[in-house]
Image (cartoon, coloured by chain):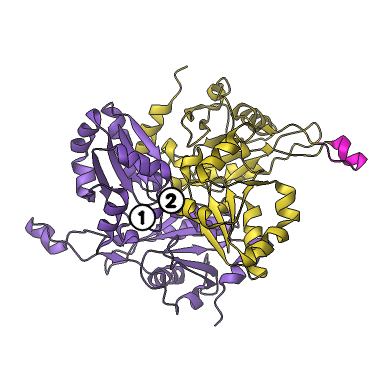
Chain colours: A purple, B yellow
Amino acid sequence: MLYIIGLGLGDEKDITVKGLEAIEKCEKVYMEAYTSLLSFGLSSHGLSNLEKFYGKPIILADREMVEEKADQFLSQAQHSHVAFLVVGDPFGATTHTDLVVRAKKMGVEVKIVHNASVMNAVGICGLQLYRYGETVSIPFFTDTWRPDSFYEKIRENRNLGLHTLCLLDIRVKEPTLESLCRGRKDYEPPRYMTINTAIEQLLEIAQTREESAYTEDTECVGLARIGSEDQMVVAGTMKQLLLIDFGAPLHCLVITGKTHPLEEEMLDFYRCRT
Amino acid sequence: MLYIIGLGLGDEKDITVKGLEAIEKCEKVYMEAYTSLLSFGLSSHGLSNLEKFYGKPIILADREMVEEKADQFLSQAQHSHVAFLVVGDPFGATTHTDLVVRAKKMGVEVKIVHNASVMNAVGICGLQLYRYGETVSIPFFTDTWRPDSFYEKIRENRNLGLHTLCLLDIRVKEPTLESLCRGRKDYEPPRYMTINTAIEQLLEIAQTREESAYTEDTECVGLARIGSEDQMVVAGTMKQLLLIDFGAPLHCLVITGKTHPLEEEMLDFYRCRT
């Protein structure tokens, strides 16, 4: 049996009782260490916090391991209980869907333990979840690669009066260009896009368009570390949010569509006073 | 302090450890009994299961109580710890946003404990969450009231290649027409829309339109009791799903947009073989 267990967003206590009981049954406990590792402070002593709380040693599984060596722990799951821990909800990332497909093809039974993810916890800003359109991802621009497919999606959403959740790029364990050329594996330091960088890139793309889907005066909500004790939620125009230091990752951004009075009332609590 | 605590979707063990610890601190524990009461089998002995597991008596708060008498428990929360339990995530329903706004206006500190809700747990069917457009609600048709605002939204979503999550009507504690006329309060028996009824209504509306946004051959996914031990997920055309008995509530329906190969692979596991 493979248990894919969502850990939620904040700390080790955001696991559900059902998830905790499943871990207790498992012989091996793996944890994805690529989509949003930082939430649980895994760079420092966070992992041992988790291990202490869950009462089991945890094997960190990076992207290569999950994508290339999944068969190894899936074959363990054919004969014993194996847990795979995921920050947020198990279906927040495509990789986990792929894992389920592989498991089912190998005849491994899969149980999912759901939890909160950014896709629903973003509701905390007061914008109603059923008024969101397609979610977009904002990738880091490079000197030569400035993809802008998010722009059309935001435009469609705003034309329909819908809000847009922007997920911001995370670069963890990216091989350096140099190492790729040499066939070695050296990794870049991890990078997490800030709300500020996201807004800069959004405005850069809008400036190249004739009729802009949004401007620096468009109302947005910046959210940092959702679900954590020190989460930060600020509503304001893009121009205003550009000046705010949201602190440590992870960040995300919502571009508002047409807002209702109750939504406005909630946003008022978060509005920046500059 | 007011704790608004998401209970998740399945049973009493879907609460997070953080949520459970918050309940332990609280003098009074209220639970919303209107949005999706049935998930926890509250009609029978489900409530006592919750009370036993959480170790506290629970006061059921129906819609009238939350909307009309919120001030009462909010003033308790000014001086002591009060928990308000919500099926799914706290921001799944507008009512809870309203509660937060009221609390903040009264100077009551609010803490949110997130959990899974249908808005992210629907990811279990394999359709990627970032490929959904606006969520729609399908209300029960009556002889004289056949609202169809969902139709245009589904059309927009499908034009953009996006999936549509359809939330199906729940009628709990609705006053009877007769009782409204007499100024008394008698209530209709609770009703929960099935996937079958939703599809019938969807097809009825499509038939009145010239260019239809979907037909009886459109691929959908029916999901019943998501997150429960006996959840049921079936992929098929509207015509096929019409013939399936999904059993007890709650039901929801996804109308697919353009699917990707990995999404198709997951749907294959759920496809009905008729």
B238 over B178 or under it: above or below: above
What's the chain of the residue with tag 1?
A
Q: Which residue is mark 1?
A: A12
Which secondary structure, mark 2?
Answer: helix
Query: A13 or B213: nearer the eye?
Result: A13
Three-letter code, disc 2: Val
Q: Nearer the viewer, residue A203 or A211?
A: A203
Q: Residue furthest right?
A: B182
- Categorize mark 2 by other alpha carbons within 10 Å: few (<14), some (14-19), many (20+): many
- B42 displayed left or right of A111: right
Q: Which residues are magenta?
A: B177-186
**From this viewpoint, is residue B9 visible?**
no
Q: Is residue A66 above or below residue B46?
A: below
Question: Is residue B184 within the magenta segment?
Answer: yes
Give the residue displayed 45% in from the left and 50% down from the top: A116
* Residue B68 point in image, percent of width and height: 76, 55
The reply to whether discs 2 and 1 touch (Cβ–Cβ < 8 Å) is yes
Amino acid at the residue labelled 1: Glu
Q: Which residue is mark 2?
A: B17
Label 1: element kind: helix
Check residue B98 for magenta coloring: no
